[in-house]
Amino acid sequence: MNLKNIHKVYFIGIGGIGMSALARYFKFINTRVAGYDKTETPLTKELSKLGIDIHYEDNIDLISSEYFDLDDTLVVYTPAVPNTHAEYQYFLEKGFAVKKRSEVLGLITKDSFCFAVAGTHGKTTTSSILAHLLKETGAPLTAFLGGISEDFNSNFLLEGTDFSVVEADEFDRSFLKLTPNIACITSMDADHLDVYGSGDELHKSFRDFVNRLKPGGKLLIRNGLPIEGITYGIEDDADYCIKNIKIEHGTYVFDLNTPEATLSGVKFNKPGRHNLLNGLVAFAMAAESNFPIRRLAKALETFKGVQRRFSYKIKKEEFIFIDDYAHHPTEINAVHDAISEMHPNKNVLAVFQPHLFSRTKDFIDDFAASLSKFDAVILLDIYPARELPIAGVTSEWLLEKIKNPKKKIIKKAELVEEIKRQAPEVLVTMGAGDIGLEVSKIKRELDYAN
């Protein structure tokens, strides 16, 4: 398919973080854009402000007639849309070009110098750091991000088309539609077992992704992962390595060893060793593309962050509120470690909304172990997303397994009052569901001095 022949794009599931970035892209290049989503959200409101027509009922009659031109209309859908969706079925039956988001992303980026960030954790933060670093060097790039960058206040950046930055999403094997010049793999922990069935099958898919590299392409690998590539790590023998870490006023200060040089006194402001690794691999990907390393190192210091990735909502001596997208046991562990490092000896209350029945079932014991590390735990009901309930898989089941007497399940409507009652020194909200929509309310109600 030649995207130059497409003048209208209709999105089914336009409000998703990845879909909305694509919608922004097509709007920016003066393509006609419209779409459907199940519910109105801050993201869909922003798209509407750009002049994109969006409706919230699965109804063919609500689609503008201009999108029924078979020859110059592209229909893009997210895998989260069920096969029974009426609009999806209509476009399929009428013979329209109907493509997954990942296919379209592959088409957009195939003729650029493409940076692809893969891994079961850290994709959004790493790609956002990389986009920031490249922008600071003046590179003409387009970036499609899986979160709202606090540097750009958007999940999309268009500074040119020579370079592209994308997240290589393993869900539904989406990353096998990309053909990157430089890629990284941050992690390969078991996840999406509803798609893959086993960790071994997931690993195979990552190896298939590596084979998608363009001729002469380069691969960055976190040191210790079972795939060959240029390695990166902390205090080890990796090709790119961070050493001699200090914390000064909440900022990491360290030496950064590259294959050719050592940079001293490099600074990075996002808490957590996992974020240090994300920053390091973003730096390494840009360095391996011959961008100037000292300029890249300076840009690391000015990275602001990504919304819902260890985002400080309140940061006072007497009370700290952090919000994070963590929805896998490994990510919860990383959040706990970051809080312990940056705010030692403080009482921490964790509020967690499990995401997906299948993921909860697959990692129930690991979730329990991760959450048991916090001083107190509040669970919300499981956020189903695309799934139907699984018998016996509930937040009550998870609660039983948490080895911490200070634990309870509540409804979202009771959340603020329960947090006030417990009065923690540090509050962290975690989850990939709609808990993110509660954050502004929590902040407003709790921005107090004890």
Image: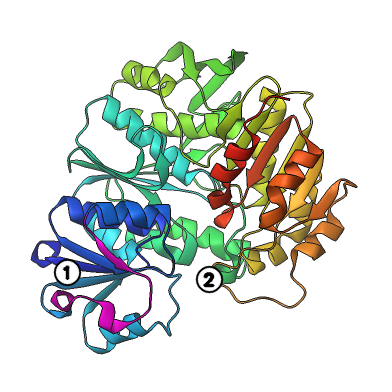
Left or right: 125 as drawn, with respect to 272: left
Depth order, front residue of 372/286: 372
Q: Which quadrant of the figure contains the C terminus? A: top right
User: Where is residue 221 shown, x and y percent of the image?
Assistant: 49, 40
Q: Secondary structure at mark 2?
A: loop
User: Where is residue 321 shown, x and y percent of the image?
Assistant: 63, 34
Left or right: 239 as drawn, with respect to 249: left
Mark 2 highlights which residue? 386
Q: Is residue 53 magenta?
A: yes
Q: Is residue 49 above or below residue 143?
A: below
Crowding at label 2, few (<14), some or many (≥20) Cα neighbours within 10 Å?
A: few
User: Where is residue 130 shown, x and y percent of the image?
Assistant: 37, 35
Q: Amino acid at mark 2?
A: Arg
Depth order, front residue of 10/93: 10
Q: Nearer the viewer, mark 2 or mark 1?
A: 2
Q: Amino acid at mark 1?
A: Met
Can residue 374 be spotted in the picture? Answer: no
Mark 1 highlights which residue? 1
Which residue is depicted at the point 53% across and 71% down? 386
Q: Which quadrant of the figure contains the N terminus? A: bottom left
Q: Is residue 301 above or below residue 418?
A: above
Q: Is residue 248 magenta?
A: no
Task: In the rendered structure, find residue 134 and report the number of the disc placed on it.
Answer: none
To which quarter of the image does residue 153 belong? top left
Left or right: 212 as drawn, with respect to 419: left
Looking at marks 2 and 1 on the same chain, the residue that comes earlier in the sequence is marked by 1
Q: Secondary structure at mark 1?
A: loop
- Give the alpha-carbon distance from disc 2 to disc 1, as whole Å: 29 Å
The region drawn magenta spans 51-67
Crowding at label 1, few (<14), some or many (≥20) Cα neighbours within 10 Å?
A: few
